[in-house]
Image (cartoon, rainbow, N blue to C red):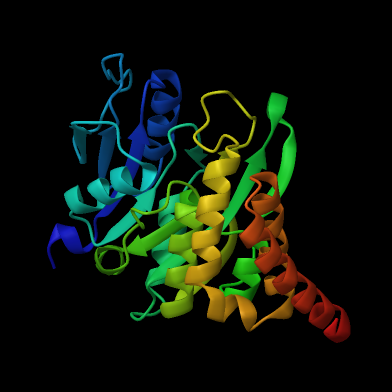
Amino acid sequence: MNNASKMISVIIVTRDRLELLNRAMQSILSQQYELLEIIIIDNQSLTPLTLKISIPENVEIKIHRTNQFLSASATRNCGIELSKGEYVSFLDDDDYYLQDKLSILKNAFEQSKDIDMVYGNTRMIGLNGTSLGVCRGPAEIASVMLNRYIHLNAVLIKRSVLTEIKFDLNMTTYEDVDLMFRIVSKHKCVHVDQDVAVWNRDNRKDQLTSRNWTRSEKNWLILCRKFSRLIESNSAVANLYYKKMFILSAIKFNLINTIIFFIKYLRYAKLAYLFK
């Protein structure tokens, strides 16, 4: 068995956040799992990318600078293409892994050969280090869609799955949500009920998930259309998704979509009430 069959490739996308990147990198290098490659996608940083940490000899580092500024979907797909491990993990440069994240999730793969993705829990941290709770839940698509508790930092995925199901280049936000929905709905996934990663939700100005109503409306519409069958198979999910869609459309003064999704929302809100 060659090393690639055991290797985990960790993909980080970064841009002008060296201090945070070094913290994220340290959390990877502190893992007990040693057969690693770390792929850093430098998405047009203005400041030269210099790592201030010691890299062990057994860890491979690839630094790839994009030729132009790319979307989150495109940069992550680039990382997947550069990876060579059997398993792929992701980490946002402003977040970090908890101890033994990779070993915990990799061990779950040893229980069954037909598992395609394993994920753990994600701690949410707000301003001044305040706890905002923990993302956790079963690998059941209606529940995942309703609560969206699978964070990209907390997953370990077979690379073969990601070469088939890549990030959607048409999406400029919710691209991670979209990926998780497609994987959970089509592949065998396992939840490990242990905290494995931290998601910083402190609303810094440089956060990638900053509020943009136009972008939110466009991408939420993609989700509603792409997963309409799954959404409409569960009245509670439909109630939630169509309510958000008509609100976003109303904020953007998109009259046609406001009317369409308000009618859909009323229909499924009634169904949700009848069957709750």
- Is 61 placed left or right of 107 in the picture? left
Q: Looking at the picture, how far across and down is residue 248, in whole percent?
A: 66, 51
> Which residue: 30% across, 13% down?
47
> Which residue: 57% across, 50% down?
217
Q: In which quarter of the image is residue 52?
A: top left
- Is 90 placed left or right of 62 in the picture? right
Front one among 252 and 190: 252
| Image quarter in which the N terminus is found | bottom left
Q: In which quarter of the image is residue 221?
A: bottom right
Q: Looking at the picture, how far across and down is residue 258, in whole percent?
A: 68, 59
| Image quarter in which the C terminus is found | bottom right
- Is 212 placed left or right of 248 in the picture? left
Front one among 4 and 268: 268
> Which residue: 52% across, 63% down?
223
Q: Looking at the picture, how far across and down is residue 16, in whole percent?
A: 37, 20
Front one among 227 and 253: 253
Q: Looking at the picture, how far across and down is residue 64, in whole percent?
A: 19, 34
Q: In this view, does 146 lie above or below 26?
A: below
Q: From this viewpoint, which residue is outermost toward the left?
A: 2
Q: Is residue 142 above or below residue 24?
A: below
Q: In which quarter of the image is residue 128?
A: top right
Q: From this viewpoint, which residue is outermost toward the front?
A: 255
Q: In this view, does 97 lie above or below 175?
A: above
Q: From this viewpoint, which residue is outermost toward the top?
A: 47
> Which residue: 65% across, 72% down?
143
